[in-house]
Amino acid sequence: MALHLLEDWCKGMTIDPKNCLLVTGVSEAFDEGSIEPILRTSTKYLSRCKMRGRMFVREEGAFAVLCELPSAVVPLQVPGTIAVEDGAWRVIATGSQPSPAPASNVEFLKKMSAFLGKEGKTLADMPGLLGLDPGVPHLEPAPSPDEWVKALGKALEKVVPPHPESSPYHKLRLFSGGPTPIPGEEAFEPWLEHTTEMLQEWAVPDAEKRRRLVECLRGPALDVIRTLKLSNPRVKVKDCLEALDHAFGRTEGSEDVYCKFLNARQQKGEKVSAYIQRLEKLLQRAIMRGAVAVEQMDQTRLAQIVRGIQYQNLILLHLRLRERQDNPPSYSRLIKEVREEEERQEEAL
């Protein structure tokens, strides 16, 4: 049915269905202006897609979205699903349908496609992940099953994050917010900076981050989170930190916090990486005060970095930061690239 909808929709709009994708399962919570940016940032292959229309599908109780690419769609490059908040969108492309495969194989491919999609990969990336060159014909005998298993294991080690229960982590510092500090407790502002940074670094689900946050709270601070959880048991960590900031942080308005962020410039003698780390703390406060939307975090950060770097402009040039503002990197990727570039420049001196 979805494939027929894609073909009929394209015919009605007089566009080539071979260049189009259908995205289904889009809830009403996503307004029309937010859908295309989510698709473009989901994978590199969809970075140039253009939303051509949206339609409510009564049978699914959700919207279907028609997207067009500059050239014919390569099915193997298309993720089967796109993970979004509280669910996933299904992506459908045209093309000849393969002969029916065993149900177990279909289910495995669905799981593999969904997993690769979360890691920013597709099935077409598998040869490269396995150390094979898909463009070169293989004159040697095909690898044995054992060799394939070893190669796949090495590839998964690169992209699968460690399980949260098996990966060691530093416990968060204690905070109570009470009139009498508990032993080892520090002031709220340093605690908030440290906690925000640690929670960003942990590659675990939001529920696990929330559990670890609750572990480090005592007294009035813990009561704040308990109250939040009564009204919303699945309250996000961001909302927890925002509530704590309102209860114990400085009474700064959102405009004041945002102005501090916009006025932050690289200081003379300050490394670009140090400037970005300092700027990130101001950005986090702006987000918690509601001055910057989480969805715009990467774009806002990169735009200010481009404005604020006053020295070592070669880093801007070499990393092409100005040109990447339409598709900005995450904080962790950006700081990694900048530090590596700083090391290269130091070695060149």
Image (tube, rainbow, N blue to C red):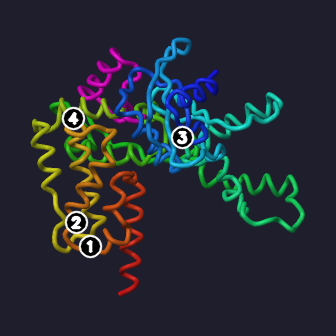
**Kind of residue sitting beneath label 2:** Ile
Tag 2 near tag 4, CB within 8 Å? no
Instruction: Tell me which numbered mark, 1 or 4, is placed earlier along the sequence.
Output: 4
Identify residue for label 1: 313
Q: Is most of the magenta stretch helix, strand or loop?
A: helix
Which one is closest to the eye, mark 3 or mark 2?
A: 2
Q: Locate residue 261, reporting x and y percent.
A: 17, 50
Please provide percent x and percent y for residue 196.
32, 44
* Residue 221, numbered label: none
Q: Is residue 13 magenta?
A: no
Q: Amino acid at mark 3?
A: Pro
Marks 3,1: beta carbons within 8 A: no
Q: Which residue is mark 3?
A: 164
The reply to whether discs 1 and 4 touch (Cβ–Cβ < 8 Å) is no
Location of mark 4 (residue)? 290
Horizontal arrangement in the rendering, residue 193 relative to residue 107 (left or right):
left
Q: Provide the residue span drawn in magenta.
A: 212-236
Q: Nearer the viewer, residue 148 or 174?
A: 148
